[in-house]
Image (cartoon, rainbow, N blue to C red):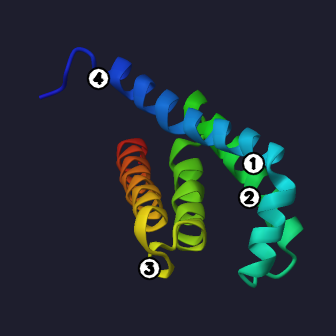
Amino acid sequence: MLSIFENEILVAARLLLGGAFVFAGLRNIQNAGFLTQLMTTRGVPQARLMLWLGIVLQIVSGALVISGVWTAAAALCLVLFLIVATPMFHNFWDHQGSERASRINGFVGNVALTGGFLALMGQAL
C-alpha cells in the first residue's frame, strides 16, 4: 500500500542522504592536506588526485540525489565510493580501545548509508 506521504518521505530521504555527502565533501576540502597525507600513508596512488576526485564525486552525486535527477546513477556512485572509502578510513581492525570503537561507529554508519542508497536506487529504477 502506498503512503499518502510517499513523495514527502522520499524527498526527506534524498535530502538527508545526499546532504550528508555534500557536507562531507565540503568538509573534506577543509581537511584536504591531512587527508592527502593519510591516503599517501595508506598506499593510495596519486593520493591528491584521488582525494579531489572523491570530493567532486561526493558533492556532485550528493547534489544529484537531493535534486532527484539521475538518482539511481548518483546513488550507485556513492555506494561504490563507500565500498572503497569505508575500509580505508574506518579500519577498526587495525586499532584498539576508544580509537577502535570510533572506527567501528564510522564503519557501521557507512554500512547504513550504503543501505539507504541501495533503497533509493531500488525506488528510482
Report the Cα–Cα distance between label 1 and label 3: 24 Å
* In the foreground, 121 or 98: 98
- Residue on which disc 2 sits: 54
61 horizontally vs 83: left or right: right
Report the Cα–Cα distance between label 2 and label 3: 24 Å
- Nearer the viewer's eye, disc 3 or disc 4? 3
Report the Cα–Cα distance between label 2 and label 4: 31 Å
- Nearer the viewer's eye, disc 2 or disc 3? 3
- Residue on which disc 4 sits: 6
Report the Cα–Cα distance between label 3 and label 4: 40 Å
Q: Amino acid at mark 4?
A: Glu
Report the Cα–Cα distance between label 1 and label 4: 33 Å
Q: Residue furthest left?
A: 1
Mark toward the start of the polypeptide (1 vs 2):
1
* In the foreground, 46 or 6: 46
Q: Position of residue 30 (x, y in %)?
A: 82, 43
Residue 49: quarter of image: bottom right
21 horizontally vs 95: left or right: right
Which residue appears at 44% of the width and 74% of the height? 96
Mark toward the start of the polypeptide (2 vs 3):
2
Residue 59: quarter of image: top right
Mark toward the start of the polypeptide (1 vs 3):
1
Mark number, residue 93 = 3
- Residue on which disc 1 sits: 28
